[in-house]
Amino acid sequence: MKNIILFSILAGIILVGCSNSQQEKEKAQKATLDSLTNVIKVAQDRKAVIDSVATTVKANEDEKFSIKDQISDFTNQITGTKKRLRNLKANLEVEYNRLEKIKEFQLLRTSDEREAQIRNQSLVIQNVQGAIEECESRLKDLGNKLTDAQTKFSQYK
C-alpha cells in the first residue's frame, strides 16, 4: 500500500511537472497567433507593394501608348500640312502668272481698270503668301511637338 501511495504521489508529481500549465498553453497560443499575424501583415505589405508597382507599370504603358498615338497624329498632320504647303506654293505661282498677264496690254481696258485688277491680284497674292507663312509656322510647331513626343517615347524604352 505504501508503494501504491508512493507510486501515486510520484506519478502525480511527474504529471504535474511534465504537463504545461494553462498559462503556458495560452502564452504558446498567443505567440503562435502573433507570429501568424506578423506573417499576414508582411504578406499584405508585399501585396500592397506589388499592386503599387503594377499600377505604375500600367500607367506607364498607358502613357507610352498615348505618346505613340500622338506621334502618329503629329506625323499625319505634318504630312497633310506639307501637302497643303505644296499646293499653296503652286497656287502662288499661278497667281503671279495671272498678275503678269494682268500687267500686259489688253485692248479696250482703261488704265484705272488695269490698276484695280493689279491691286486685286496683289491682295490675292498676299493672302496666299499669308497662308504659306501660316503653313510654315504650323509645320515648325508640329515638328517641335513631334520631337518632344519622340523624346518622351524614347524614355520608355
Image (spheres, rainbow, N blue to C red):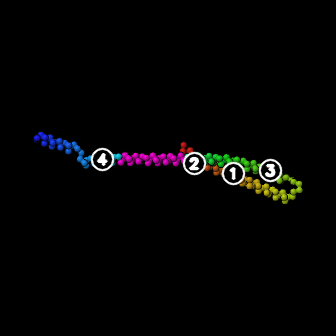
Residue occupied by mark 1 = 135
Which residue occupies the extreme front position in the image? 1
What is the C-alpha distance between the residues marked 1 and 2?
26 Å
- Give the CA separation, mark 1 to mark 3: 22 Å
Q: Amino acid at mark 2?
A: Ser
Mark 1: give few (<14), some (14-19) or many (20+) Cα within 10 Å: many
The image quarter in which residue 127 lies: bottom right
- For residue 34: magenta? no
- Relative side of 6 to 94, left or right: left
Between residue 7 and residue 87, name the one nearer to us: 7
Between discs 4 and 2, the one toward the N terminus: 4
Residue 55: x and y in percent read 49, 48
Question: On residue 66, which mark appears?
Answer: 2
Q: Which residue is mark 4?
A: 29
| Alpha carbon separation for disc pair 4 and 2 | 55 Å
Q: Residue at x 89, y 54 (%)?
A: 107
* Mark 1 or mark 3: whose residue is earlier in sequence: 3
| Place of residue 157 in the rendered image (x, y in percent of width and height, measured from the top left) | 54, 43
Q: In this rendered view, identify the residue nearer to me: 93 or 47.
A: 47
Q: Quadrant of the N terminus?
A: top left
Q: Which one is nearer the viewer's eye here, 33 or 112?
A: 33
What is the distance, in whole Å, between disc 4 and disc 1 at their CAs? 80 Å
Q: Where does label 3 land, which residue? A: 97
Observer-nearest of 102 and 15:
15
Q: Residue at x 28, y 48 (%)?
A: 26
Is residue 23 visible in the rendered image? The answer is: yes
Q: Secondary structure at mark 2?
A: helix
Can residue 62 be found in the magenta stretch?
yes
* Left or right for 125, reference 71: right
Residue at disc 3, secondary structure:
helix
Query: What kind of residue is marked 1?
Result: Cys
